[in-house]
Image (cartoon, helix red, strand yellow):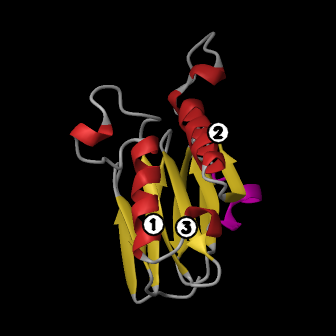
């Protein structure tokens, strides 16, 4: 990965969208990171959401929060409009949704990671966004680095006992 002029690290609930020579990084467990990249304009962004949706008052009565998948899609939409683009022009890559704890007898479909990954896919499909890569599920955590200039994403997946999983590490 070529060094960028600026690096941004996203914590849970944070969102970044830029046109500059920037690398956006995050660390994921059951949370999801979505990268959106415009292949012609070389602009894009990344979110780090923690839950599929907000349960409570409607978004019209509150401020958007990067913690929720449905709010994040509205945040991406606002940024696309700011650059005179539409979401369907972007390519998406989705990461995270890992299962951090295995409970005896737990159905993997009921984990928060699985619910987050499903919400991301559903929302991206509703916006007709091309999903290039989904690297979700399994046990462990992921370190993500997104190069906004090229659209490349580097992933390091570390398994449940700290073992690095080399077959799925690297640029995608």
Question: Magenta stretch containing residue 165, yes or no?
Answer: yes
**Mark 3 nearby-residue class (10 Å; few <14, some 14–19, many ≥20):** some
- Check disc 2 and report the residue beneath it: 137
Q: Is residue 98 visible?
A: no
Residue numbers of the magenta segment: 164-172
Mark pair 2, 3: CA separation:
29 Å
Q: Nearer the viewer, residue 81 or 119?
A: 81
- Check disc 3 and report the residue beneath it: 86
Q: The residue tagged with tag 2: helix, strand or loop?
A: loop
Q: Is residue 116 above or below residue 4?
A: above
Q: Which residue appears at 31% of the width and 47% of the height? A: 65
Q: Is residue 112 above or below residue 25?
A: above
Task: Pinpoint residue 144: horizontal percent, then vertical percent.
Answer: 53, 62
Q: Which residue appears at 42% of the width and 34% of the height? A: 53
Task: Pinpoint residue 155: horizontal percent, then vertical percent.
Answer: 61, 62
Question: Which quarter of the rendering shows the C terminus?
Answer: bottom right
Q: Nearer the viewer, residue 155 or 150?
A: 150
Mark pair 2, 1: CA separation:
19 Å
Per the rendering, the mark at residue 25 is: 1
């Amino acid at each position: 990965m070529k060094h960028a002029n600026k690096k941004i690290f996203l914590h849970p609930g944070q969102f970044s969208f830029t046109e500059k020579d920037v690398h956006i990084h995050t660390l994921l467990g059951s949370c999801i990171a979505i990268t959106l990249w415009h292949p012609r304009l070389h602009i894009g962004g990344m979110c780090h959401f923690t839950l599929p949706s907000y349960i409570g008052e409607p978004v019209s009565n509150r401020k958007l929060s990067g913690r929720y998948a449905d709010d994040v899609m509205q945040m991406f939409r606002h940024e696309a409009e700011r650059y005179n683009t539409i979401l369907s022009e972007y390519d998406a890559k989705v990461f995270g949704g890992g299962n951090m704890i295995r409970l005896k007898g737990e159905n993997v479909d009921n984990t928060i990671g699985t619910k987050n990954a499903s919400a991301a896919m559903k929302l991206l499909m509703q916006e007709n966004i091309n999903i290039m890569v989904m690297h979700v599920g399994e046990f462990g955590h992921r370190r993500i680095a997104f190069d906004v200039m090229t659209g490349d994403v580097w992933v390091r997946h570390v398994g449940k006992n700290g073992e690095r999983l080399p077959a799925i590490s690297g640029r995608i």
